[in-house]
Image (spheres, grey):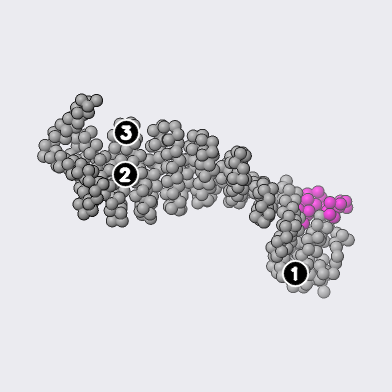
Amino acid sequence: MKSLDELLDENYQNLFDEECKKQVLDFLKEKEDLLDKHVLFIKKFTKVAHHILSQDPDSLKGLLPKLYQFNLQGVQLVRHYDQGELSYPNLISIASHLHGYAAAVAHAIYKEDPAEEWGVACYRSNRISAMLIRQHNQRYSAYTYGFTGSIAKTLYDQTQDPIWLQRWHNAKLMSAELAEEIDVTHSAYCYSIAGKASMMIFQQDETRLEWGLRWYEYYLKSAEISLDSNRKHSAHAYSFAGNAAMTLFEKLEDPQWGMIWYNSYISSGEFSVDTDVVHSYNSFRIAGNAARDVYKKINEVEWAEKWFDALFRSAELSRQVNVRHAVNGYSISGDIAEEIFSKTGDIDWAHQMYQAHLQAAELCKDSNPKHSAHQFSYAGNASKLLAMKTGAEQWIRDTIYCYEKFLDFYTHNNIDRVHNVVKRIRSDVYLLNLSLEDPDSLAKKATLKKKDKEEGD
């Protein structure tokens, strides 16, 4: 029969021998400690025991606390090792892995019986393992810091002690930084988690603005580094960065944060167009909200234009999958275009006003006839304005078409409170039809209106 030492050598990388498993379990039951064993034996024994824990945890029932202690005894022997057979980097690696195995054992105990002390033991051993190996095996250290952060979050959920939130943040951030050049997917994920932890810390005390900034910065970092490898993740991370910027804008009332909020959601929308159209059109909608709030804060037309562009894009993307959303987007876009036209006098914005309201009207004429009728009337107002400005016959015909759609609805749905509007539009349709017979009449009418206004002034 092979000795335990021989079996450990053979099963070191993968456990395949039942005899090895039996001897390891028997050894665990019989021995009280490993302090009389060589460091290399402990390294092999604890690794094979780790294989057993992964493959058949039930076989270790009642033995896990002892196995945990065996790992820590191994660390103690490494600390006092003076035989010169093993180099310093070798010893560091052995100690790190022993702490890692101890963490796995503590976690297994904690899952069965969530006593806080075993959660803390798991956290502590993982953290030490990651710290020890950081300069020698960056990949292993990065992943181990990730495990450290996860157990810290579990302990926060259990205890609600804020110190575990900060430890969750610290470990995930370290994992993200170490993995950035090694495993960008892992790094991006951990930056996002660090962002979430920062958000939770900030929400507990909003006077600590540095955590609000970290909330934004870590999600932005996650978005940027994952853009080429995982656009869907990147798009969502940009939206979370936008949420942080929105919160800072509302708290600080600084337009710069409103602009960052807008830019974050524009990026989120752009980078999800091909992967998640629902996320994309909602992101453009929220970008529009950001542009609106910046516009109201600084009253610069550029931001009204961004507001229009974002909502119109949202409407365009959603018209095949969410008609109600699209109609709302087109309707508001038309109102924005009207406001921009009134400020700038730029006739292009009268065109935009017409197109937006017309799209809304056509899109909901079956699902919401009343809203459609009113959108046709607004489109008609825009095309009448264009007719007055240009004298073009086509705009006259477009105005008649839109106004008649409005009148069709109210011919069948008589509502007293819109009686004056209906009366005015009927009069306009009559005059517009006359103008088609006498092309000069519309220009004359415009001139008379201008003259009446001047005399009234």
Disc 3 element: helix
| Residue 214 visible here | no
The residue singled out by tag 3 in the image is: 342
Asked where in the image residue 32 lies, by quadrant, the reply is bottom right
Residue lying farthest to the bottom in this orientation? 1
Q: Position of residue 387 (x, y in %)?
A: 21, 37
Disc sitting over residue 61 in the figure: 1
Which residue, as the protein is rendered here, is positioned at the far left? Answer: 437
- For residue 302, side relative to residue 53 (left or right): left
Q: Amino acid at mark 1?
A: Lys
Task: Estimate the spatial distance between the alpha carbons at disc 2 and disc 1, rounded to whole Å.
Answer: 69 Å
Where does the image place residue 139, in percent across and percent down from the top left? 67, 51
- Camera-near label (2 vs 3) is 3
Q: Is 97 in the magenta?
A: yes
In the foreground, 129 or 113:
113
Report the residue at 38% width, 40% height from top. 308
Front residue of 106 and 255: 255
Q: Earlier in the sequence, mark 2 or mark 3?
A: 3
Q: Give the magenta-colored segment's residue range.
A: 76-98
Residue bearing the label numbered 2: 356
Crowdedness near tag 3: few (<14), some (14–19) or many (≥20) residues, C-alpha within 10 Å: few
Q: Amino acid at mark 2?
A: Ala
Residue 456 percent coordinates (x, y): 22, 27
- Circle 2 residues within 10 Å: few <14, some 14–19, many ≥20: many
Disc 1 secondary structure class: loop
- Residue at 32% across / 34% down in the picture? 341
> Which mark is on residue 33?
none
The answer, for residue 297, to whether it is visible in the render is yes
